[in-house]
Amino acid sequence: MLNAKTLVRLLVSVTPLVSSAVRAEPPAPEVLQFEVTPFIGYRLGGHLQLIDNGQTVNVADHSSLALAFDVRVADSDSTQYELFYGRQSTVLSGDVFVPTSVRAEYLHIGGTVALEETPRLKPYLAGGLGITRLTPDSVLGNDDTRFSISLALGLRVPVSQHFSLRLEGRGFLTPVNADSAVFCHSDQSSALCEVRARGSLFFQFELLAGAAYSF
């Protein structure tokens, strides 16, 4: 049976070991669930082939802006849900009408999946489904909204626990049905009165650079 003096000696000898174990245990890492990333970019491509004369209407290459909001999947460090919005103000031009300002927008819901990572570089794949909206900058023009898909390859470069840089290349694909009216104007004198495209794919590619904040 232990007496009081023996019990005190035992406690004195055990206390440093317990303290060392407590000090050696690392603090639990902070769980970051959300990420917001504003992007600046440059969007390339985009054309439609007209039914009437076979000529091509082109969307000029131009700078763009985008915003992504990501939510981390529960119990996963490599997968996120993502809401992506991108916007480009550019010019639609062709041989059959005067160049006209147009706005091309994408709103997609999808996600990101991390690839093989290193401590300093985190490559990922991203994709989404949503809509493409083309809006001519004219009081006579009607906007056009269609289904579209996107696929991206990106790279995260961590700067701190909450901040990272994101570099991304993203392609957008919008199916255009045969004999489809893309823009229509009520004024018959307008150069964009009836732009009808052959069945084809409207494709654009975008280079993006952004700063991501996680919280």
Image (cartoon, rainbow, N blue to C red):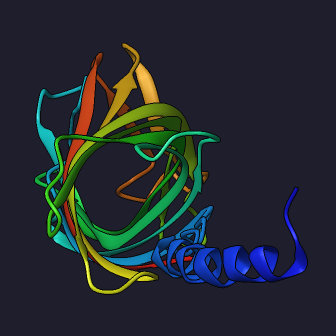
Question: Which percent across, then down, holds residue 212?
Answer: 41, 77
Does 27 sit above or below residue 153? Answer: below
**As displayed, is residue 67 above or below residue 52?**
below
Q: Is residue 170 left or right of residue 79?
A: left
**Splitting the image into 4 quarters, where does residue 7 fall?**
bottom right
Which is more toward the observer, 108 or 115? 115
Vertical relation: 38 (above or below) 203: below
Residue 117 picture location, percent across and down = 18, 50
The reply to whether residue 90 is in sight is yes
> Which quarter of the figure has residue 19?
bottom right
> Residue at the spot x=43%, y=63% of the render?
86
Give how far across and how far down residue 202 sits, in percent: 27, 35
Residue 143 horizontal side relative to residue 39, left or right = right
Q: Quadrant of the C terminus?
A: bottom right
Quadrant housing residue 122: bottom left
* Residue 148 image point, x, y percent: 44, 33
Residue 87 is left or right of residue 92, and the answer is right
- For the N terminus, the image quarter is bottom right
- For the residue pair 142 and 131, the one nearer the viewer reads as 131
Residue 66 as seen in the image, left or right of residue 123: right
